[in-house]
Amino acid sequence: MVPMTKTSIRPIRWHGGKVRLLDQTRLPGEVVYLEISDYRDLANAIKTLQVRGAPALGVAGAYGVVLAAQAIGAREKKGFLEALDKAAQELRATRPTAVNLGWAITRLLDTAKQGASVGEIKEALLAEADRIAREDEAGNLAIGRYGAELIRSGSSVLTHCNAGALATSAYGTALGVIRAAWEQGRIKRVFNTETRPLLQGARLTAWELLQDGIQTTLITDSMAGYFIHKGDIDCVVVGADRIAANGDVANKIGTYTIAVLAAEHGIPFYVAAPTSTVDLSLLDGGAIPIEERRAEEVTHLQGVATAPEGVRVANPAFDVTPHQYVTAIITERGVAREPYADRLRKLVGEEPSVG
């Protein structure tokens, strides 16, 4: 097997008591890193998509809790935990659809409860946030290994939005699969959608693939059906922001459309995501909250109006792909197929009760 190469792209890390964040709103024109020392500034960075992607939001949320802890002056554990919980809820509310954000914040709060003193808690929080970042990178490499095995040699692969190194701590989920399969010589061609309205595919996916020497063909979202019908696409690989217990998948708006097209034409539709993205508390995708974003994201492009003033706008950031359109879900612990309700529980480590 060809050894897997770690990408040099690291969108978020802890450095010198601050969060060092690659500002994704400036790509591809500028590579700008932000130094964030206040959790409220990090919360704003999450809201404005300076950091985005479910796994990356988990890492950002964890470090956000660390920043909040650093600023709390309370010396007694009870008062400290109350202040920490308040800050954590502010961070949690920034992006409601991506389950990794809340998952990581809860993990940090659970860590805080176990500490004996405020000083001990602060040290433990940073250690736990670092652990989440390391686990994410290791998990992405594992997702890449499992996913590459599903890609037939000579395949042309389509991906939507950005589920790469920029959406994680490093390497990527869907792009992790593509990176691994490319290194093994299984992929002959990559297509990526521009991903309206914020062009994460055009600005981010195309940029990071080219950074790693992987040639990609950029298409508009509305061209996907054309190229699938022509037979130019052999499989689809996308990421996820939340996966319900039955295998329904919430991902960037437009994913459902591509999944239906893939099913109609008989090509595999793969979802790559860590087990932390699986939300077993939700029976199906109908319970997944869908974030509605600002109208200006649709009516304007880089600050320039592209629609008449006063037009009504709908701007859901995500859609839900029903599980019957998903060929397989690739995680760091293995690959799940139907019936997802049973197999996802096993992968996550929560076996169904008997009796």
Image: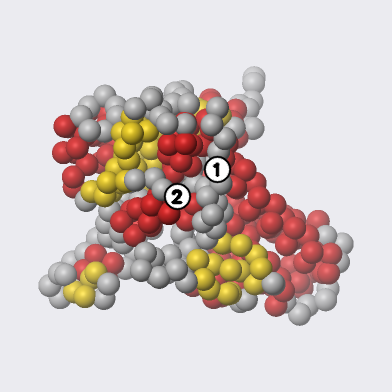
Residue 25 in which image quadrant:
bottom left
Residue lying furthest right in this view?
116
**To which residue does mark 1 refer?**
5
For the C terminus, give its image quadrant.
top right
Q: Amino acid at mark 2?
A: Asp
Q: Say what secondary structure mark 2 lies in.
A: loop
From the viewer's perspective, tell me whether residue 16 is left or right of residue 145: right
Specify whether residue 183 is in view: yes
Label pair 2/1, CB-CB below 8 angstroms: yes
Res 226 quadrant in image: top left
Give the answer, above or below, for where 7 lies relative to 328: below
Q: Position of residue 124 (x, y in %)?
A: 78, 60
Q: Position of residue 90 (x, y in %)?
A: 56, 69
Question: What's the CA distance linking mark 2 and mark 1?
Answer: 10 Å
The residue type indicated by label 1 comes to: Thr
Q: Residue at 27% across / 72% down in the picture?
A: 302
Depth order, front residue of 92/253: 253
Q: Quadrant of residue 117?
A: bottom right
Q: Identify the residue at image location x=41%, y=48%.
A: 213
Of the pair 140 and 124, the residue shown nearer to us = 140
Picture coordinates of residue 139, whole percent (x, y): 59, 41
**The residue tagged with tag 1: helix, strand or loop?**
loop
User: Would you say 261 lies left or right of 64 here?
Assistant: left
Residue 318 visible to an observer of this rendering: no
**Badge 1, how many Cα within 10 Å: few under 14, some, many 20+?**
few
Nearer the N terminus, badge 2 or badge 1? 1
From what the image shows, is residue 142 above or below residue 6?
Answer: above
Residue at 47% in and 56% down: 166
Q: Which residue is mark 2?
A: 212
